[in-house]
Image (cartoon, rainbow, N blue to C red):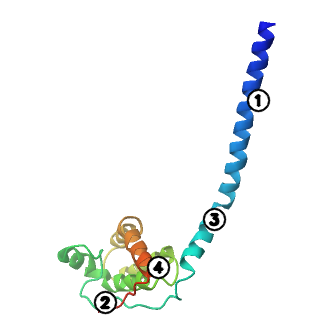
Amino acid sequence: MRHLLNLLISIYAVLVGLLYTLVIVISVIPFFLIHDYVITFFEWLIFSRLPEPKFIPAPEIEYYCGPFYAPYFIKKWMSKHHNMSCKLHDEGYNSQPTSRLEIDKLFLSNMLETVKQGKGTKFGAYSMYYLVRYVVGWPSWYLIKGYKALGGKLKSK
C-alpha cells in the first residue's frame, strides 16, 4: 500500500510538472511568434506622432567623420578620405528618412565608391563601417530619435 501511495504521488508530481511546463510553453511560444509585431506596434505608438521626416543638413564643420565627442585630431585623421561620405551619413542620421541599417549601408557604399576613385582602402572603409554600425553609431541614432520625440528640433549652424 505504501509503495502504491508513493507511486501515485510520483505520478502526480510528474503530471503537475508537465502541466506547469505546458502552461509556460503555451504562454511563451505565442510571444516569440508575435514579438516583432508587438515591438512594431509600440514603435508605431510612440513614433507615429512625430512629423514626417525632413532633410536636415549637417552643420557646416570642417571634419565630419567620428562621433561629435571625438577630439579634433581624431576627426581630422578619420576624415582624410571619407569626409563627404561622413557628411552624408550625418545628414541621414539627422533626417532619419529610413532605417539606421539602410543609412549605414549607404555610408559603406559611398566609402567604397571613394576607394574605387583611389582614395583610402577597403580595409579602412569596412573598419569605419564597423565602428559606425556596432560601436559609436547607435547612441547617436537613438539620441537624435529621442530628442526629436521630445519635441526638439535639429538645425544646422
Residue beneath disc 1: 15
Q: CA distance from mark 4 to mark 1?
A: 50 Å
The amino acid pointed to by label 2 is Pro
Badge 4 density bin: few <14, some 14–19, many ≥20, Cα 10 Å: some
The amino acid pointed to by label 1 is Leu
150 horizontally vs 4: left or right: left
Q: Position of residue 6 (x, y in %)?
A: 75, 14
Residue beneath disc 4: 149
Badge 1 density bin: few <14, some 14–19, many ≥20, Cα 10 Å: few
Q: Which of the two labelled residues, at mark 4 and mark 2, occupies the earlier sequence position?
A: 2
Q: Is residue 66 above or below residue 135?
A: below
| SS of the residue under disc 1 | helix
Residue beneath disc 3: 38
Quarter of the picture holding the N terminus:
top right
Pair 4/3: label in front: 4
| SS of the residue under disc 2 | loop
Q: Is residue 109 above or below residue 54?
A: above
Residue beneath disc 2: 59
Q: Which of the two labelled residues, at mark 1 and mark 2, occupies the earlier sequence position?
A: 1
Q: CA distance from mark 4 to mark 3?
A: 20 Å
Q: CA distance from mark 2 to mark 3?
A: 36 Å
| Residue 113, quarter of picture | bottom left
Q: Which of the two labelled residues, at mark 1 and mark 3, occupies the earlier sequence position?
A: 1
Badge 3 density bin: few <14, some 14–19, many ≥20, Cα 10 Å: few
Q: Residue at x 27, y 80 (%)?
A: 79
Of 120 and 148, nearer the camera is 148
Of 102 and 95, nearer the camera is 95
Q: CA distance from mark 1 to mark 3?
A: 33 Å
Is any atom of residue 108 visible in this view?
no
Of 123 and 141, nearer the camera is 141
